[in-house]
Amino acid sequence: MFKLDLSVQAIPIIIFCLIMQELEVGTNPVQVETGEFDEAIEVVEDVIAENPCLNHHCKKGKVCEVDDSNQPMCVCQDPLTCPAPVGDFEHVCGTDNKTYESSCHFFATKCALEGTKKGHKLHLDYIGPCKYIAPCLDNELNEFPLRMRDWLKNVLVTLYERDEDNNLLTEKQKLRVKKIYENEKRLEAGDHSLDLLALDFEKNYNMYIFPVHWQFGQLDQHPVDGFLSHTELAPLRAPLIPMEHCTTGFFEQCDADQDNYIALEEWANCFGIKEQDIDNDLVI
């Protein structure tokens, strides 16, 4: 089973999660080219007047077109217009157990099914081609939060170490992570035994409170309402499922009232955070 740690292999997952959380879920990061319009700043107003679509936003899977009255409208994107994938790493697996060439191809297909029962049930399941995911045993499910808690703490520490340009963490977040980073009792990242992870959580419980809240805040974006939907969970679960087969079972278990949304209280409880330590201010 894949162990969640900050090995070299895990770093791309962290970077991917950050990109996906900054962009609207479903945006293909490969399509985003920073600085593309830097040289056209002086003529932007004239271009917008000519093409209303340049100032009109469409949700994932849709593109803007101009109607007969020169008004912008969003229509489903033709999957054939999606950029060709650079490699297998761009493939995604849908909940229909079908491999799509990229997230662009997936969301364009989902849009075409809008309003149908099939379209309502179709979600992006995980990153990479579809493959057999082994069932998660009860004992494995119980072990999952031990590794996940440690991983979240290590992700924050790594971001703190790399945040030279102050664009990965806010000043308030950095102050909180600094206390964890400078604590000499902090368990360094590594392939630790489950017994050691459990013992560290018991002895250094306070170090895990903020990382758990921080991840909830990173995911709760569309909209910011104190609940995590299936779509909001995607940036975290999609990269992990191919490597950690208990991911889906864990998130399903977190939804204690089975309303298809995970509240902050449910999320914190899943990671063993005590009720008196749940604080909405920590997710900001």
Image: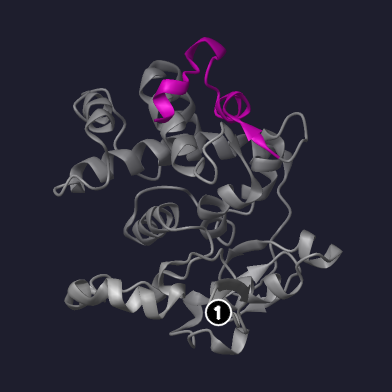
- Element class at badge 1: strand
Comparing 139 with 262, the one in front is 262
**Which residue ends up furthest to the right in the rendered image?**
117
Q: Residue at x 45, y 29 (%)?
A: 213
Total labels: the figure holds 1
The quadrant the N terminus occupies is: bottom right
The quadrant the C terminus occupies is: top left
Which residues fall within the magenta stretch?
A: 261-284
* 146 with respect to 109 (left or right): left
Magenta span contains residue 48 = no
* 8 with respect to 114 (left or right): left
- Amino acid on which the number 1 mark rests in the picture: Glu
Residue 168 in the image, given as x and y percentages of width and height: 27, 46
- The residue carrying pointer 1 sits among few (fewer than 14), some (14 to 19) or many (20 or more) residues within 10 Å by Cα, namely some
Residue 56 in the image, given as x and y percentages of width and height: 47, 66
Q: Residue at x 37, y 61 (%)?
A: 12
* 22 with respect to 113 (left or right): left
